[in-house]
């Protein structure tokens, strides 16, 4: 595997480079943002490991430039910024993983290997659509006909399962196992109550109802 490592700390860069090489990887290193951007745009890498806090052109800016250019090479950001907002910003900007300093090099290598096992981004679904309903799986947001639909976490999970099986009959057992992780029937109205709230949020005010009940069998979302 060929990796580009951007890190301005000499000792850390050398330590990480040696560990990556010991793990069997080919490593190009850079201590500055401009050099890293040049290498990233003139060579083919399997993974980019970029320090977010390099002075001048930092790792986050490099990654954004690559994403604008439709470069989908997996990026792991290294940073001393451990706030949730910082992580969200990095991931929303296109990073595939985020590791906070100080870190164990063995964890870094494990995360790099995990990135290589992921399917390409182009094969990963991040937005689901049925009719005029749209689910954004990263932002965890839902809209219908452009109108925002506010859902609780379990309602989002329930709707996602239905949309992923649009046009198919979804039984009560399937919902219990895949939405609630129940492998038994709790003999409660948990599904009915969640489905009622979900319908009210998704279908109320629209002429066409997306969520349908199949009497005695389960539910189906209208694939149109």
Image: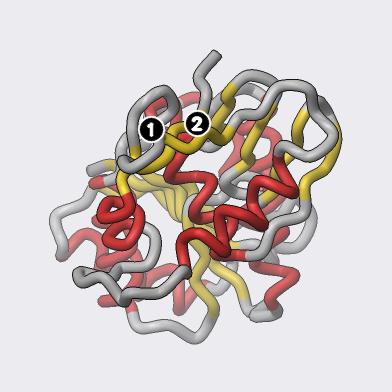
| Image: 9 above or below 133 | below
Q: Residue furthest top?
A: 224
| Image: 6 above or below 130 | below
| Image: 76 above or below 103 | above
Q: CA distance from mark 1 to mark 2?
A: 8 Å
Residue drawn at x 39%, y 59% as measured from the top left: 179
- Disc 2 is placed on an element classified as strand
Residue drawn at x 65%, y 62% as measured from the top left: 52
The N terminus appears in which quarter of the rendering?
top left
- Residue 192 x, y percent position in the rendering: 50, 59
Q: Which residue in the protein does label 2 denote?
A: 221
- Residue 182 x, y percent position in the rendering: 28, 71
**Residue 111 in view:** yes
Q: Residues within 10 Å of mark 1 (few under 14, many from 20)?
A: some
Q: Residues within 10 Å of mark 2 (few under 14, many from 20)?
A: many
| Upstream in sequence: badge 1 or badge 2 | 1
Q: Which residue in the protein does label 1 denote?
A: 165
Residue 154 placement: quadrant:
bottom right
- Are the residues tagged 1 and 2 within 8 Å (C-beta)? yes
Residue drawn at x 45%, y 76% as measured from the top left: 12
Colour mode of the rendering: secondary structure
The C terminus appears in which quarter of the rendering?
top right
- Residue 181 x, y percent position in the rendering: 30, 68
Residue 36 placement: quadrant:
top right
105 left or right of 11 in image? left
- Residue 153 x, y percent position in the rendering: 60, 65
1 left or right of 38 in image? left
Between residues 87 and 2, which one lies in front from this camera angle? 87
């Amino acid at each position: 595997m060929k990796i580009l490592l951007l890190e301005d700390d000499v000792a850390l860069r050398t330590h990480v480079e040696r560990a990556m090489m010991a793990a069997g990887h080919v490593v190009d290193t850079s201590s500055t943002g401009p050099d890293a951007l040049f290498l990233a745009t003139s060579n083919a890498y399997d993974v980019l490991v970029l320090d977010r806090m390099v002075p001048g052109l930092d790792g986050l800016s490099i990654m954004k430039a690559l994403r604008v250019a439709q470069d989908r090479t997996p990026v792991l950001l290294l940073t001393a910024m451990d706030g949730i907002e910082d992580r969200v910003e990095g991931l929303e900007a296109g990073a595939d993983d985020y590791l906070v300093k100080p870190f164990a090099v063995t964890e870094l290598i494990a995360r790099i290997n995990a990135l290589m096992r992921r399917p390409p981004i182009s094969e990963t679904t991040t937005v689901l659509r049925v009719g005029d309903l749209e689910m954004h799986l990263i932002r965890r947001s839902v809209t219908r006909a452009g109108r925002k639909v506010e859902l609780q976490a379990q309602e989002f999970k329930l709707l996602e399962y239905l949309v992923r099986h649009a046009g198919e009959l979804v039984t009560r057992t399937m919902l219990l196992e895949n939405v609630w992780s129940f492998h038994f029937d709790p003999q409660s109205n948990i599904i009915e109550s969640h489905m009622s709230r979900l319908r009210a949020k998704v279908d109320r005010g629209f002429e066409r109802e997306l969520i349908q009940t199949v009497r005695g069998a389960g539910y189906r979302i209208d694939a149109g």
